[in-house]
Image (cartoon, helix red, strand yellow):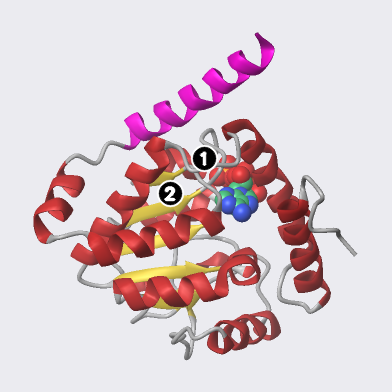
Amino acid sequence: MIPPDHPRYRSLMTRERLAAAARDGVLAMEGLTAHGRGEAFDYLIGERTTGSALLAERTAAALLLSARHPVISVNGNTAALAAPEIAALQKASGAIVEVNLFHRTEERVRLIEELLTRAGVEVFSGTAERLLPLSHDRAWCRRDGMYAADVILVPLEDGDRCEALVKMNKTVIAIDLNPLSRTARAASITIVDELTRAVPEIARACRELDVGERERLVSRLDNHYLLAEAIREITLRLRACSG
Ligand code: ATP
Ligand code: MG
């Protein structure tokens, strides 16, 4: 039992959730260590949505709304942490939701699709093919799903698939707490924020943005600036803590 007045209640509860998801077979064990790396960076940014992250979230919403074929790619961590939030984002953005896993088994795909469906997501499933130019199982996807996407949201992505998707001329929106990761550097736009804070903000912006604001946000997109700001926020915080 974790007492609600514990100073790290939220983080401890999240860990419990992920551990349960691993026991249920939704999350690969490796997903737990990926979360740990994320938590460390969340500490450094102060466990809050920074100004530049909010700008990135609003720009991501603008990109999804302007897309011809927007897709949200869901892995085990995303399903375990944010299934209802993904359902709300799908409603607000009109995007296709498709499961894509690094540690892929048919059984895990099925479990995650069921979890998402229970949370209200309309899951794009069907026969997957090895369509992406990758030597690991992230290559598996559906021809009319993420293979055809022009804009793709990839929470907690690995760097090489991110690079492959960009090479295929897709606009790639990453959510990654680590502004130094290959994913963060390779994406068209990186949201340096925690998944469960980021997804509801993107959904909110989808509901709020008018066409003029959308166009302005998309035309001013500068991932270099967003990453530099994220690193600057971390530096400021470290300096404040050390001073
Ligand atoms: P790369 O190959 O891009 O350099 P990596 O090997 O560091 O990435 P992985 O371990 O493949 O990354 O994926 C985990 C990434 O997701 C980490 O960079 C981590 O910071 C981030 N991450 C983990 N949990 C969360 C979360 N809840 N919200 C946002 N980002 C997260
Ligand atoms: Mg990686």
What SS does tag 2 mark?
helix
Q: Which mark is residue 5?
A: none
Q: Using the rendered view, name the quadrant where residue 56 is placed.
A: top left
Task: Name the residue nearer the viewer: 155 or 160.
Answer: 155
Classify mark 2: residues with Cα within 10 Å, few (<14), some (14-19) or many (20+). Answer: some
Q: CA distance from mark 2 to mark 1?
A: 8 Å
Q: Quadrant of residue 66?
A: bottom left
Residue 49 x, y percent position in the rendering? 48, 43
Relative horizontal placement of residue 179, taking residue 163 as reference (left or right): right
Label 1 C-beta lies within 8 Å of the nearest ligand 1 atom: yes
x and y percent of residue 76 in the render?
Answer: 64, 69
Residue at 42% in and 74% down: 88
> Residue at label 2?
163
- Which of the two labelled residues, at mark 2 and mark 1, occupies the earlier sequence position? 2
- Mark toward the viewer: 2 or 1: 1
| Residue nearest the observer in this picture, 238 or 5 | 5
Name the residue carrying label 1: 182
Give, as a single range, the part of the protein colored magenta.
223-243
The residue located at (30%, 51%) in the rendering is: 58
